[in-house]
Image: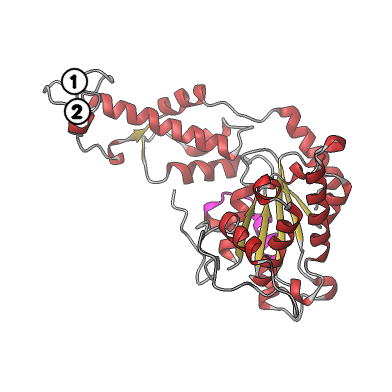
């Protein structure tokens, strides 16, 4: 799948090259500068290079894409309009089953809107390697303000809410995070910073953290049309037998996540590729082809194997490949869990 598409002349992601912090320390206020050592850690371990993900690489979710375009693009085009009560959202939560594209959406948001992308896991902020974790959280937000426009993406944000038995360090980090989320977007120095988070367990978020996300967006399992799009993206230009109808196949995948479908498509291609290899005379890992030469699967020194040119153009997918792959790749999300997501969305989700 090609993940290098961009829409028109949209600016590319402005980032710090991983492992090579920019010269100097970013200014974070009229009389302050960020801690240079912590800033270097943020840029080395958290700032991600160009994600290369565009909107066209994400099947479906048109309403979610529209929300992000309104949140990030329109305020740039019409800054005089988007202020006061119309100020851009400063905190957005993506929740839903695993494998539905939440992280992919975050990467597209950054690359399509020319934002510095801070890819954060809770472990990045609570690791003993960093010592005083609260200071690292502070450096993260200070660096994001200096690099604005910026997107701070926090994956598995529910890890900051571990219940009554949570570690003291986790509690302090969460308090620091909440404090900075309160400040994002309220001052002139905070404009252009979006906190975007994702979770598979929204019910684990405490009230304080949940309130910081003004938009809470449910990312559901793909519908029939979206499943067809995902299959098309995954299988790409690989040839298909006339008896293969993608729309019909997608109807058989109710309850599959986008990740499940991707795994299924990979298995379909692998099954077809095995047939091509076997038809070319390679019958096993310890066998020799009829001509007696060392080749794929032949005994002897692997470094001397002569590999015949077998390209993907030799693969032709048929219904049998799909049925056999479907037997191996089952859906990963339980129906009871989906009902739990829908209920939480009814109570707390944004419409």
Check disc 1: other Cα within 10 Å, few if <14, some if 14-19, many if 20+: some
Q: Residue at x 61, y 37 (%)?
A: 257
Residue at 66%, 39% in the rendered image:
221
In this rendering, would 110 be left or right of 344? left
- In this rendering, the answer to whether 136 lies above or below 228 is below
Q: Mark 1 points at which residue?
A: 288
Residue that appears at 66% across and 77% down = 77
Residue 112 sits in quarter? bottom right
x and y percent of residue 292 in the render? 12, 22
Q: Position of residue 144 (x, y in %)?
A: 67, 66
Q: Is the magenta stretch mostly helix, strand or loop?
A: helix
Element type at mark 2: loop
Q: Is residue 305 above or below residue 7?
A: above
Residue 155 in picture, x, y percent from top left: 67, 47
Magenta segment includes 149: no
Q: Earlier in the sequence, mark 1 or mark 2?
A: 1
Q: Are marks 1 and 2 in contact (CB under 8 Å)?
A: yes
**Image-based side of 255 in relation to 170, left or right:** left
Pointer 2 local density, CA inside 10 Å: few below 14, some 14–19, many at least 20: many
Residue closest to the eye, 248 or 177 = 177
* Foreground of the two, 86 or 238: 86
* Closest to the observer, 192 or 80: 192
Query: In the image, residue 156 lies at what x, y percent?
Result: 70, 44
What SS does tag 1 mark?
loop
- Residue range (magenta): 57-71
Q: Residue visible at 74% across and 31% down? A: 337
> Can the viewer see residue 243 in this picture?
no
Marks 1 and 2, how far apart in space?
Answer: 7 Å
**Badge 2 is on which residue?**
295
């Amino acid at each position: 799948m090609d993940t290098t598409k961009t829409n028109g002349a949209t600016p590319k992601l402005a980032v710090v090259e991983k492992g090579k912090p920019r010269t100097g320390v970013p200014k974070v206020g009229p009389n302050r500068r960020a801690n240079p050592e912590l800033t270097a850690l943020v840029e080395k371990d958290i700032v991600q290079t160009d994600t290369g993900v565009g909107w066209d690489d994400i099947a479906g979710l048109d309403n979610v894409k529209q929300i992000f375009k309104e949140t990030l693009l329109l305020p740039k085009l019409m800054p005089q309009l988007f202020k006061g009560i119309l100020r851009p959202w400063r905190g957005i939560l993506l929740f839903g089953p695993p494998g539905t594209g939440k992280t992919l959406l975050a990467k597209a948001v950054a690359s399509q809107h020319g934002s510095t992308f801070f890819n954060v896991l809770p472990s990045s902020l609570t690791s003993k390697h960093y010592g005083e974790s609260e200071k690292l959280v502070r450096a993260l937000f200070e660096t994001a303000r200096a690099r604005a426009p910026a997107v701070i993406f926090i994956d598995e944000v529910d890890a900051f809410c571990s219940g009554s038995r949570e570690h003291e360090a986790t509690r302090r980090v969460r308090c620091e995070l909440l404090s900075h989320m309160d400040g994002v977007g309220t001052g002139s120095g905070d404009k252009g910073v979006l906190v975007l988070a994702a979770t598979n367990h929204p019910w684990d978020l405490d009230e304080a953290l949940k309130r910081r996300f003004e938009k809470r967006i449910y990312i559901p399992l793909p519908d029939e049309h979206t499943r067809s799009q995902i299959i098309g993206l995954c299988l790409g230009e690989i040839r298909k037998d006339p008896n293969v109808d993608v729309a019909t196949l997608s109807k058989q995948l109710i309850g599959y996540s986008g990740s499940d479908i991707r795994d299924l498509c990979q298995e379909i291609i692998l099954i077809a590729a095995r047939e091509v290899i076997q038809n070319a005379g390679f019958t096993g890992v310890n066998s020799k082809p009829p001509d007696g030469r060392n080749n794929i699967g032949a005994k002897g020194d692997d470094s001397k194997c002569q590999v015949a040119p077998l390209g993907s153009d030799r693969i032709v997918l048929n219904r049998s490949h799909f049925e056999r792959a479907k037997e191996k790749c089952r859906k990963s999300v339980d129906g009871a869990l989906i009902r739990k997501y829908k209920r939480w969305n009814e109570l707390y989700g944004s419409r």
